[in-house]
Image: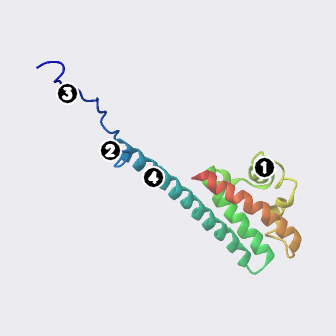
Amino acid sequence: MTMATLVLRDVHVPPSPSWWPLAPGWWLLIAAIVLVIVGVTAWRLHRHRRRQAWQRWFDATSEENTPAARVAAMSELLRRAARQRDASADRLEGEAWLRFLDGGKGHAFTQGPGRLLLDGGYRREVDAVELAAARVVARARFLELMAGSR
């Protein structure tokens, strides 16, 4: 064969691989990302529902008959929550109990509306405004104690 009869053809590059279907490694990566998203969402939903249950539990104290009974119910729930944080906390009394409730973050119980928890359950008359203010700080501390215990 001579050079004149040799037929030369251009070099053909094969087509580039398509992006679909994905390689198995990409499917594993997508599955891992979906599992992480589902897990985080489920965990956050669980925390949200648990917090709502605690709020309903605390808010049920407002169904007591007298304001003094409401104060006593709030104090009982705080003691239950405190017991989960520290086993001996429910035996604290007086100023030591209020200091524990303050938790080193302010003075809402030792000098603020939370002082009502000391003797409010034993009073004949409890001022509605004082009860509402104590309820706000007690509810916040109850939720904080419950969230910290799990």
Checking the image for residue 125, the label placed there is: none
| Sooner in the amino-acid sequence: mark 1 or mark 3 | 3
Q: Is residue 49 above or below residue 110?
A: below
Q: Quadrant of residue 3?
A: top left
Q: CA distance from mark 1 to mark 4?
A: 46 Å
Residue holding disc 1: 99
Residue mark closest to the camera, 1 vs 4: 4
> As shown in the figure, which amino acid type bears the numbered disc 1?
Arg
Q: Is residue 62 above or below residue 88?
A: below
Residue 31 as seen in the image, left or right of residue 122: left
Q: How packed is label 2: few (under 14 Cα within 10 Å), some, or many (20 or more)?
A: few
Q: Residue at x 60, y 52 (%)?
A: 149
Residue mark closest to the camera, 2 vs 4: 2
Q: CA distance from mark 3 to mark 4?
A: 56 Å
Q: Quadrant of residue 9?
A: top left
Q: Residue at x 68, y 55 (%)?
A: 144
Q: CA distance from mark 2 to mark 1?
A: 59 Å
Q: Which residue is outermost to the left?
A: 1
| Sooner in the amino-acid sequence: mark 2 or mark 3 | 3
> As shown in the figure, which amino acid type bears the numbered disc 3?
Val
Residue 70 as seen in the image, left or right of residue 123: left
Q: Quadrant of the N terminus?
A: top left
Checking the image for residue 7, the label placed there is: 3
> Element at badge 3?
loop
| Sooner in the amino-acid sequence: mark 1 or mark 4 | 4
Checking the image for residue 24, the label placed there is: 2
How many labels sit on residues? 4
> As shown in the figure, which amino acid type bears the numbered disc 4?
Val
> Element at badge 4?
helix
Residue holding disc 4: 34
Image marks 3 and 4: residues in contact by CB distance under 8 Å: no
Q: Where residue 72 appears, x then y in whole percent?
A: 74, 69
